[in-house]
Image (spheres, grey):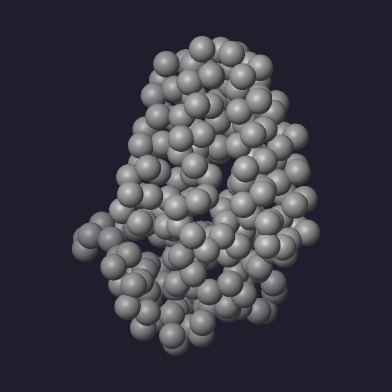
Amino acid sequence: MTAHALQHDPFLPTLRLVAGKKPSVDDIYPRLFDAILEQRIAPSSRFTEEGLGESFGVSRSVIRRVLAKLSHQQVVILRPNQRAQVAAPDAQQARQILEARRMTEITVVQLACAQATSAHIRKLRELIARERDCIERNQRGPAIRLSGEFHLQLAQMAGNAPLAQFINSLVPLTSLIIAQFEAKACTYCAWQEHVAIVDAIEQRDSSTAVALMTQHLDHLESKLLKHH
C-alpha cells in the first residue's frame, strides 16, 4: 500500500481520537498495530511518517516513536533513508519464534505461579474478557493484539525484567505471523486456553500451568504451520 493509498484508506480515519485530546504514543501504538494486523497496512508495504501522521491526526514525532517501538518488536523494519516497512516473517522464522517462546514461557508460568497476586489474576481475567469481546465482535486485529498482551502481562507478573524484555521481542512478532498466516479469525490463540492457564496460576499449580502453556503454544504452532 502506498502512502497515498494509506491516507485515503476509509478505515483509518475512524482511528482518530477525540478532538482536543493530544494523542500519545500509547494511544497510537495499538491503533497502528491493529491496522497492521488487519492488513489495512499490508505485509511488506512501505509507508511514510507524514502519511501515518495525517491518517492518525498526530505529529511525525509521535509516529516516529510508535514506529521505533514496533521496530524494537520486529513488527516494522526501519532502515536509514528508507521508508518504514511491515515485516513479513516466513515459516522458518515462525517455527524459531514459537520454539523460543515455548522454552521461555514455561519459565514464565512457573514464576507467575509463585508471584501471582489477586490483582495480577484480576488483570489477566480482564484482558481475556476484552479479547473474547473482540472475537465476538469479529474485531480481528484487536483480538490478536490482546491475545498477545495476555502473554506480555504474564511475563510482567513473573518479576524477571530480562525475561519480560525477551518475551516482548517475540510476542508482537507472533501476533503479526498469526495475522499473516491464519486466515480464519476464530481459530487463533483461543481465549478458553488462556482461562485454563489463569485458573492453574491462581491455584499455584505450576505443573498444570506448564502443561497448559506447552499445549497452548503447540496448538498455535500446529494451526499456523500446517500449510507451510
Q: Is residue 94 above or below residue 110?
A: below
The one nearer the camera, 211 or 83, is: 211
Q: Is residue 205 above or below residue 130?
A: above
How far across and down, in percent of the image, does residue 90 sit?
72, 64
Q: In this view, does 152 lie above or below 158?
A: below
Residue 216 visible at all:
yes
Residue 159 sits in quarter: top right
Locate residue 99 relative to residue 62 in the image: left or right. Answer: right
Residue 174 visible at all:
no
Q: Tell me which residue sits at (50%, 33%) in the image.
A: 194
How far across and down, in percent of the image, does residue 207 sit?
66, 17
Q: Tell me which residue sits at (55%, 30%) in the image.
A: 154
The one nearer the camera, 228 or 9, is: 228
Residue 103 sits in quarter: top right
How far across and down, in percent of the image, does residue 83 sit?
61, 78
How far across and down, in percent of the image, does residue 186 sit?
45, 52
The residue sitting at the front extreme is 226
Q: Is residue 153 above or below residue 183?
A: above
